[in-house]
């Protein structure tokens, strides 16, 4: 889980959660796989069909602004997105991603373009743009967040450890 490979799908700044999954679907179904077919459709129709398992959503600043609904990271995960990568995140979206088990990487994305192949080491905070042979240093996730991600999200982590486990050995 620490090292992931995939293709970059790039978006700009201020990509809000209503662009990730339109609010018009909010009450139609709780089936994330069904909702994922509508991911980003308002700004990139057909985006769901472009995704290969493990690909990355890459954005500029303030990814995940807007509504605090967990559907946005859940839909990205259900669509097969391996991680979200951005220059900066809206705080609640960042935390919701961790909580649902979707890795997040905060790094300068200015050297990543649509279709670039990336190799991401979440634990070390390293993003290699394989296409351009460029290595970018991100902030590594704290061990507790890595543990939550490796357990599949916060709910799974709590079930697995009968509560919140802080130590790696828990």
Image (cartoon, rainbow, N blue to C red):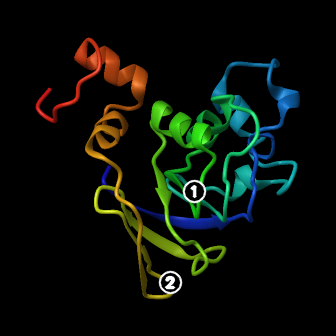
| For residue 67, above or below residue 124 | above
Q: Position of residue 43 (x, y in %)?
A: 85, 55
Residue for badge 2: 131
Residue drawn at point x = 35 percent, y = 63 percent: 125
Q: Quadrant of residue 72?
A: top right
Residue drawn at point x = 64 percent, y = 37 percent: 75
Residue drawn at point x = 82 percent, y = 57 percent: 44
Residue drawn at point x = 46 percent, y = 38 percent: 98
Q: Is residue 35 left or right of residue 79?
A: right
Q: Position of residue 96 (x, y in %)?
A: 55, 34
Q: Is residue 135 left or right of residue 93?
A: left
Residue 52 tag number: 1
Q: Position of residue 111 (x, y in %)?
A: 57, 81
What's the CA distance linking mark 2 and mark 1?
A: 17 Å
**Front-most of residues 79 and 106:** 106
Q: Quadrant of residue 149?
A: top left
Q: Position of residue 127 (x, y in %)?
A: 42, 70
């Amino acid at each position: 889980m620490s090292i992931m490979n995939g293709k970059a799908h790039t978006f700009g700044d201020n990509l809000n959660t209503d662009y990730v999954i339109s609010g018009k679907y909010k009450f139609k179904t709780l089936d994330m796989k069904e909702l994922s077919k509508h991911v980003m459709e308002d700004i990139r129709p057909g985006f769901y069909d472009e995704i290969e398992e493990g690909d990355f959503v890459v954005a500029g600043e303030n990814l995940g602004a807007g509504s605090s609904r967990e559907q946005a990271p859940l839909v990205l995960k259900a669509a097969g997105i391996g991680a979200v990568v951005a220059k900066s995140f809206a705080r609640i979206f960042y935390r919701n991603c961790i909580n649902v088990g979707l890795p997040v990487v905060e790094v300068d994305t200015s050297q990543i373009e649509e279709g670039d192949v990336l190799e991401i080491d979440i634990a070390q905070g390293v993003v290699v743009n394989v296409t351009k042979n460029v290595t970018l240093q991100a902030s590594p996730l704290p061990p507790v967040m890595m543990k939550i991600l490796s357990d599949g999200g916060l709910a799974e982590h709590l079930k697995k450890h009968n509560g919140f486990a802080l130590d790696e050995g828990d």
